[in-house]
Every structure is written in structure tokens, then in C-alpha cells.
Amino acid sequence: MNINNFIVICLIFSSFAFATLSRSNNIVTDSKTKLMWQDDNDSQTQKIKWIKAIEYCKNLKLDKSNKWRLPSIVELLTIADKTIYSPALNPIFKNVTSSYYWSSSGYRNSTNTVWLVNFNHGGDIALSKYDPRYIRCVRPI
Amino acid sequence: MNIKTFFTILLSLSVFLFSNLTRNNNTVIDSKTNLIWQDNIDSKKKNVKWANAVRYCKDLRLDGYTNWKLPNIIELLSIVDKSKYNPAIYSTFKNVSPLYYWSSSPYVSNPINSWGVDFGTGNDGAYNKSHSIYIRCVHSNDKK
């Protein structure tokens, strides 16, 4: 093996080793967090209330996978990329709106407020459960 | 050993085994992220502008550690406990104000700001770099 081949193989290997996100059809898989993320047309266009979002994820079937759920705020923040904006999300995700996405995590002791991530800039915020917001369901690998 | 003592020992042991945070004098070590955090009186009291925060961390010496830096926003979010508030931080940390703390991460859509975390509520936000807010420096355990 000459040195050029060696370098090419090293490069391919390192890009494989360091890229934690991969895509297939309507799902993006994160090998670091061991989570699979919904990334179909719905995750760009569906805007529903929190209680409907819980139900939506529970009923979701995508690429033959089921057992989806709404992500916790900590999980949802793992895909927010604050080094970019509008959207603040890795471009491997194809279906995104630069706006608020639901998490399952409640805010303090409030029964009316939950945590969301604003994928315009990647920050989080607590807002009312009763307004329609976007959804991206998650499931373990 | 009676049953109560046994359970107390079991409980202490499991807290010890599952908590990734341990305390030194003025620092908290996170074995999961491999980060060492400043946790002295300055991290509760001192508030400075962003540029001064960068310099403060660079000059910090604490519990024998040098090479401190301002945490990036992902590092800073790793010590937020969103199940708590006032302050929304893991309870191993003793020196905290329930207010805004600097990160090193630029707010890319408007660089007059930098990302920070509000340790009252636990949410992150963009703060104007010329404002004075709180600081908690971090040290990467990989290089002592």
C-alpha cells in the first residue's frame, strides 16, 4: 500500500468514526446518543398542540419502525446546532422549519408549560402546551 | 447489621456509584463529560463582561489546576438540571446564583451577543457581551 492510499483510507475511516449522524429514508440516526430521529415531511409541516404531539409520536410508524415518542428537552438539545442558524440543525436533516419544536419535559411544577427548542437559533424556552408547535419524534436505536 | 442500616448503606453506595459528579475544595469533577468545574465563591458572586470573563478564566488557578477556559454552550448545558429551578443546577454545586452565566459560544445570527444559561430557570439565551453576568470556568480533565 502506498502512502496516498494509506491517507485516503485514514480519511475515510476518520470521517466514518467522527460523523455521528447518518440518514436513511425518513430517519436520521445518531450513533453517539443512540437515538433515531423522525425526518419526514411531517417533521417540517405538522404543527399541533402538545397533547396531540404525544399521541402523534405514540402512533407514528416510519420506515417500519414504531415505538416513537416525544423527545425530552435534553435529547432535543443534542441535535440543536448553535453554530448555524435558520435552521440551527445539522443539514443532514432535510425536513425542518426554523421554529419551536415540542419536548416532553414539563417546566418547573407548571401543568400548562413545557420546554421547547427554537430551531431558528437552537436555544430552548418554556411555552404554553396549548398552542400548536412543530414535532420531531425520537426512538432508541 | 439491622435492615435499616443495610438499606442506608445500599442507598449511599448507589448514590455514589450513579452520580457522575464529585466535589473537591473549590471544584466539581464530572466523570461523564471529563470536565472539571470551578465552584468557589467567585462562581457565585463575580459578574463581568464577556471579554473579561474570557480573560478571568484564562488566568484562573484553582485546586492546583491551570488552563481554565470559559465553557462552550454545550458544556455549560451539561450541568443544568432542568428538573430544578432557582437554581437549575445539579446539587453538587454549592456556589451558584440563580442568574445568567456566560458561555464562550458566539450567537451566530447576531455576534454582539454570546450564548449563556439562566441558572434560575435552566434555559439558554443570547446575552449582550457588554453586559456583566456570572462566570463558571471549566477545565478539560484531559490536560492537567
Image (spheres, coloured by chain):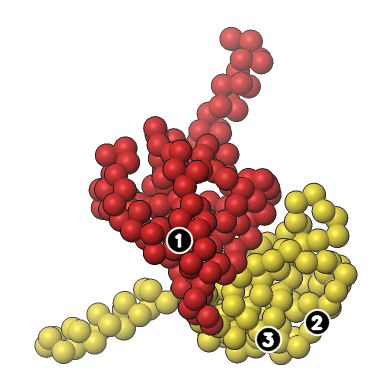
Chain colours: A yellow, B red
3 vs 1, front mark: 1
Amino acid carrying label 2: it is: Lys
Q: Which of the numbered marks, if any, corresponds to residue A97?
A: 3
Q: How many marks?
A: 3
Q: Nearer the viewer, residue A6 or B96?
A: B96
The subunit letter for the residue under badge 3 reads A
Residue type at numbered disc 1: Lys
Query: Based on the displayed image, in which of its 4 quarters is residue A117 positioned?
Result: bottom right
Residue where numbered disc 1 is placed = B49
What element does badge 1 sit on? loop
Is A40 on the left or on the right of B74, as rendered?
A: right
Residue A101 location (% of width, % of height): 71, 74
- Give the structural element (helix, strand or loop) at label 2: strand
The picture places residue A70, in percent across and down from the top left corner, at 73, 67
Judge by depth and name the residue closer to the eye, B57 or A104.
B57
Q: Is residue B1 above or below residue A128?
A: above
Q: Amino acid at mark 3?
A: Thr
- The C terminus of chain A: image quadrant: bottom right
| Residue density around tag 3, few if under 14, some if 14–19, many if 20 or more, within 10 Å | many
